[in-house]
């Protein structure tokens, strides 16, 4: 278990360096520990050594862990969300990173109304245009926001993207930069019911570049837990 503590220290140091490189406050960057195949013991250890946010890819796996881990942590859904899982997701997650269709947004809004709650979400953007990735096209983001800003039970809190896998980290920099520019543009426009609080970009392979390009939320799994 010592390895999780050591890994987390290394990640935190890298986050700090990347933030300071661009004159940013490292404390402003939120670390989401993605627990995809981590055991309950590993997750408990990660929480013990300082993890505050758990990121899950699948609702079903999160349900099982959520019932066991009743500690005071935030739960984020970082994977794709199917509409038939929304009713479970909104009960567990403090933030859903992967809203990418009006159909999904409507279902979240409807279920949130039933539960008498407001659900915080990020809009997933497919900046790279890869067909294998979820997310809406960058040019569709603003019309999409206009439409979902009318939903009373959803609060948009920012944007999220997954960059392509690249040997050279520098190859992904333009994708992060493009999303940051869009994020800043939307922020200035101050749209109703839309807040640009979080720019969720960067994973184990590329989070330092993402931070340099403006990410204030990074999603790290393998770098902490060592799984493949």
Image: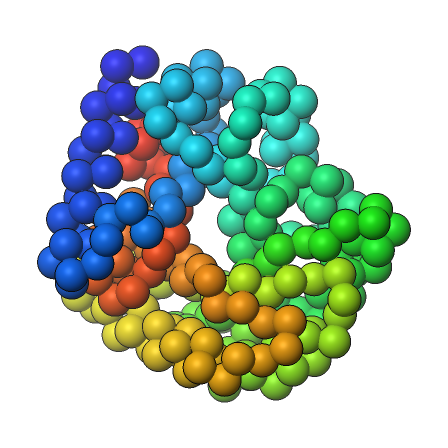
Q: Quadrant of the C terminus?
A: top left
Above or below for 215 versus 95 = below
Q: Quadrant of residue 70?
A: top right
Above or below for 42 versus 207 = above
Please provide percent x and percent y for residue 127: 41, 73
Colouring:
rainbow
Please provide percent x and percent y for residue 93: 62, 42
Q: In this view, does 221 lie to the left or right of 90?
A: left
Number of numbered discs:
0
Please provide percent x and percent y for residue 162: 41, 60
Extreme right residue here? Answer: 114
Q: In which quarter of the image is the N terminus?
A: top left
Q: Quadrant of residue 180?
A: bottom left
Residue sitting at x 75%, y 70%: 151
Q: In this view, does 21 lie to the left or right of 194?
A: left
Residue sitting at x 33%, y 60%: 215
Residue sitting at x 14%, y 48%: 17
Q: In which quarter of the image is residue 141?
A: bottom right
Q: Is residue 146 visible?
A: yes
Residue sitting at x 52%, y 31%: 73
User: Residue 41 or 119: which is nearer the viewer?
Assistant: 119
Q: Can residue 111 be seen in this view?
A: no
Above or below for 98 versus 36 = below
User: Residue 27 or 125: which is nearer the viewer?
Assistant: 27
User: Residue 31 or 189: which is nearer the viewer?
Assistant: 189
């Amino acid at each position: 278990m010592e390895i999780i503590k050591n890994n987390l220290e290394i990640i935190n140091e890298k986050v700090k360096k990347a933030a300071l490189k661009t004159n940013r406050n490292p404390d402003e960057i939120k670390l989401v520990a993605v627990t995809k195949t981590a055991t309950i013991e590993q997750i408990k250890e990660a929480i013990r050594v300082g993890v505050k946010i758990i990121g899950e890819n699948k609702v079903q796996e999160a349900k099982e862990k959520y019932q066991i881990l009743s500690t005071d942590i935030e739960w984020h859904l970082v994977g794709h969300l199917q509409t038939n899982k929304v009713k479970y997701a909104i009960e567990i997650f403090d933030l859903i990173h992967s809203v990418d269709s009006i159909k999904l947004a409507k279902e979240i809004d409807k279920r949130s109304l039933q539960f008498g709650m407001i659900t915080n979400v990020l809009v997933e953007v497919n900046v790279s245009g890869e067909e294998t990735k979820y997310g809406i096209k960058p040019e569709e983001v603003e019309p999409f926001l206009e439409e979902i800003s009318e939903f009373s039970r959803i609060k948009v809190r920012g944007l999220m993207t997954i960059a392509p896998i690249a040997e050279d980290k520098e190859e992904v920099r333009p994708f992060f930069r493009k999303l940051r520019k869009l994020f800043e543009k939307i922020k200035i426009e101050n749209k109703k019911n839309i807040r640009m609080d979080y720019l969720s970009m960067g994973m184990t392979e590329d989070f330092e570049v993402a931070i340099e390009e403006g990410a204030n939320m990074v999603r790290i799994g393998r770098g902490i837990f060592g799984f493949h």
